[in-house]
Image (cartoon, rainbow, N blue to C red):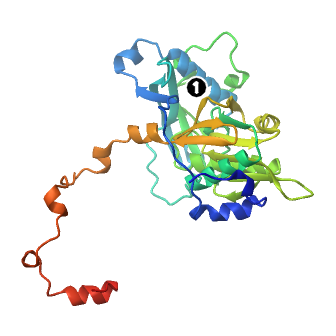
Amino acid sequence: MPVDVDVIPADFTAFLRMRETALMTMATPMKFSGGTAQRPATRKEINSGIFNGALIKEWAKIFLNSVLGKKVDRDEVVAVLPLSARFTWKENGETGERDTNARVYFQGFKDPREMPTYAGTPSIHSIYIAIIYMLSKDFPMLKADVSGAFLQAEDVCDEKIGIRVPGIRILPNFPDKKPKELSKFTDEQYEIYIADKALYGGPGSARMFSTKAKTKLKELGFEEIDESIHVQRETNTNEVNAVIYHHVDDFEGGAMDIEEIFSKYGHRLSLGSLVRVVNGEVAKFVGIEQMRQGKKMILSQASFLNLLCVDDLLPEKKRVMREEDMKVPEDDMIDLSLKPRYQSLIGTLG
């Protein structure tokens, strides 16, 4: 059903409580494209050295974010984990262009002890309602992603993990301007360094980043009114004047001064690209394609659904429905002896 943006209540918190009954048209009158897909690299491609540049960039992020702390002995940490790397091609769904990507991560985490790992994700219905509210206020909208998200989140656990790092001399050759943080590392192989930040692969890494992201939004005057849905209010009227929601390290929001807000947020968390949601152009937030048209927005999850492997989700295929299956059964085809019992249980008349 179409939504009349002129009758949305000013109190966004109250409006959000209506989410269970809120409806929004999910039209797909056009083919959406865009976004990126990742394809694993082959062993031959990795051995060719084509991913060395991407690996250098990843190590630079690790050092510049001070992920590795002081050098320690084995008995100073509860566990020691080796590092590994994953190499993929990032392919642009619209242009077909591709780029190399490398990700360094913890390997072999097998600690059986319980630890807090929950990192909430926003309800898609809450996102829809947030979009309706921003459209009703004619807010400019902006998308942002956090660069090296987990690498910026402090490891706040009491018990620390050690990382066994390969000798710096066997890491990819850094450019002439080496990060000054590199000076504290030795050339000896397999030294152990304490993990000061939430490296990829750690079971609590997503939670650590999510906690930091929400804390930094709170510092800017935002309050979380639903999981990962944040609003900022006018001091005098208490009316919501800015909305930001996020799924892990992907952010989207709207306000009259949304660029200034994200600029301030970028001083607290290093942001990557900032993309304005422009009228008539396709934008994508996680699995939601968007096309804004003034105070309206066309939404679709078509590309997300197309990528789902139905055979994996429904391994046991159901029998195809035939015309004869739809015919009313004859009395001699079914056992009617339990009919009164069924009727008493489910309250059916007749």
Residue with the mark numbered 1: 58
In the picture provided, is 220 more to the left or to the right than 205? right
Between 13 and 138, the one nearer to me in the picture: 138
Q: Position of residue 262 (x, y in %)?
A: 77, 37
Between 70 and 154, the one nearer to me in the picture: 154
Quadrant of image for the N terminus = bottom right
Q: Is residue 38 above or below residue 149?
A: above
- The residue carrying pointer 1 sits among few (fewer than 14), some (14 to 19) or many (20 or more) residues within 10 Å by Cα, namely some
Which picture quadrant has residue 253?
top right
Between 234 and 40, the one nearer to me in the picture: 234
In the picture provided, is 126 more to the left or to the right than 254? left
Q: Residue furthest right?
A: 236
Quadrant of image for the C terminus = bottom left
Q: Position of residue 214 (x, y in %)?
A: 71, 50
- Can residue 195 be seen by looking at this rendering? no
Q: Amino acid at mark 1?
A: Glu
Q: Is residue 349 above or below residue 304?
A: below
Between 159 and 54, the one nearer to me in the picture: 54
- Can residue 35 be seen by looking at this rendering? yes
**Residue lying at 76% horizontally and 42% vertically, measured from the top left:** 138
Q: Position of residue 114 (x, y in %)?
A: 51, 60
Which picture quadrant has residue 53?
top right
**Residue lying at 59% horizontally and 53% vertically, measured from the top left:** 122
